[in-house]
Amino acid sequence: MQTAEYFKNGQVLLIDKPLNWTSFQAVNKLRWAIRQAYSIKKIKVGHAGTLDPLATGLLVICTGKMTKQINTFQGQEKEYTGTFVLGSTTPSFDLETEIDQTFPTDHITKELIHKTTVQFIGILNQYPPVFSAIKKNGKRLYEFARAGEKVEIKSRQVEITEFEITSINDLELKFRVVCSKGTYIRSLANDFGKALNSGAHLSELRRTRIGGFNVENALTPEAFIENLPAK
């Protein structure tokens, strides 16, 4: 039975984050709901790995004493599915910003697409998007980007263990990726477009797994809150 102590002692909550929600909003919503339901003045609640507002899927949210395990969960491999759009790029590498460049795609064949995925399996040096929450000189990179300021970004070593194109519909590619902590799928989209001698951006992203936790077992924030006692 769920009680105040149940959440204070520490629980791992699997939440399916809706589109256009920030991870911070999801954590705040659950924290507020737990506090209200059980008349708790203060409780620790945190997530094990951010999802962009334009992404959906699995958020591992920890409460109480389980927040000490957040770093462990963050370090586990992750699985994503989504869509790349070929022939155009955006500054943010996804749909947060408008298309800024277009590229030829007539030379791209299904064979070339599948062959190119092999280049991205293994340990890679990846440049994070300038529109990201990584800090540099005390500021988030997206703050520099939105102000139109140029900033030097260092590459990071990431590992992609599985990468497959699951369907091709004209310029839209559906994919599945299994990767290490710190991998930016937006950057993968951008790099994949370059490798095809064209361009690409991410139009859809869903996180389906973190370690042994699967989105199939997750609840939406609304469904989780509905299961709490009414005040």
Image: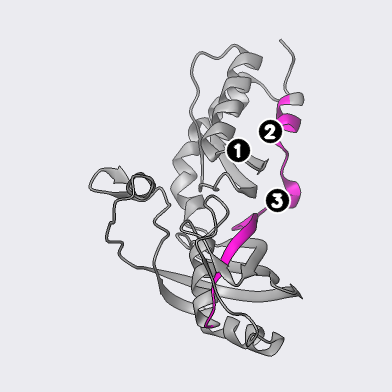
Residue kind at label 2, given as amino acid type: Pro
Nearer the observer, 61 or 9: 61
Camera-side mark, 1 or 2: 1
Which mark is on residue 221? 2
Residue kind at label 1, given as amino acid type: Trp
Q: Position of residue 50 (x, y in %)?
A: 51, 47
- Position of 222 relative to 167 (above/below): above
- Position of 217 relative to 40 (above/below): below
Return the residue at label 1: 21
- Region rendered in magenta: 197-225
Circle 3/circle 2 CB separation < 8 Å: no
User: Looking at the image, what colour scheme do you see?
Assistant: one colour
Query: Quick check: 148 left or right of 117?
Result: left
Query: Quick check: 1 left or right of 98?
Result: right
Residue kind at label 3, given as amino acid type: Val
Q: In the rendered image, which quarter contains the N terminus?
A: top right
Query: Quick check: 146 left or right of 150?
Result: right
Return the residue at label 3: 215
Q: Position of residue 43 (x, y in %)?
A: 50, 23
Residue in the picture at 58% in, 17% down: 35
- Mark 1 and mark 2: Cα distance apart in space: 10 Å
Q: Around disc 2, counting alpha carbons within 10 Å, would you say few (fewer than 14), some (14 to 19), or many (20 or more)?
A: some
Residue in the picture at 71% in, 44% down: 218
Circle 1/circle 2 CB separation < 8 Å: yes
* Residue 200 lies in the magenta-colored region: yes
